[in-house]
Image (cartoon, grey):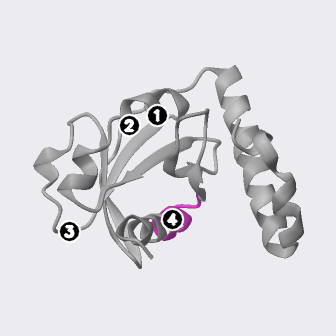
Amino acid sequence: MQPGQVLARGVCRLLSSLDFASVEEFVPARGLRMDVFALGPKGELWIVECKSSRADFNSDQKWQGYLEWGDRFFWAVDEDFPTDLLPEGCGLIIADAYGGEVIRMGPEAKLAPARRKKMTLKFARDAARRLQGLRDPGVEASWGPQAQA
């Protein structure tokens, strides 16, 4: 597992403890790929970008494009990451492979109802396709471009 994947696993465990369902490597639109996208018990949608190093953070030029797709945005880093590099006004999660803690809640920017519906449906369909792909690996080949849209 790559360091970012290790962080994502811990983030998903944390989110599960908060009653959120998570999907890793979520594609809200072509050209974007969120590390973790989570659906909460009240329909809230959280985005978490996992950064394993300074170089990983410095190479990320797309993160601001994710803000319009969720209600809250968080950075997830390990305890050794220099958090002063992270932009203020975003949430912060400190995580490792086994869990994490929300250090700073990301500000809420509620999605418009039409966008919320679209993202909730996409979350559900992507999660269901992944589950079906685990149960029947032959189905994965049929996902095609609709899984990326």
Q: Element type at marker 3?
A: loop
Q: Which residues are magenta?
A: 13-20
Q: Quadrant of residue 114?
A: top right
Q: Are marks 2 and 1 in contact (CB under 8 Å)?
A: yes
Q: Main secondary structure of the magenta part?
A: helix
Q: CA distance from mark 3 to mark 1?
A: 24 Å
Q: Amino acid at mark 4?
A: Cys
Is 15 covered by the magenta stretch? yes
Q: Position of residue 90 (x, y in %)?
A: 30, 39
Of marks 2 and 4, the one in the foreground: 2
The residue depicted at 17 percent of the width and 61 percent of the height is 81
Q: Going from the N terminus, do you reach mark 1 or mark 4 first?
A: 4
Q: Which residue corresponds to mark 4?
A: 12
Residue at (48, 44) in percent of width and height? 47
Residue that badge 3 annotates: 79
Q: What residue is shown with label 1? A: 66
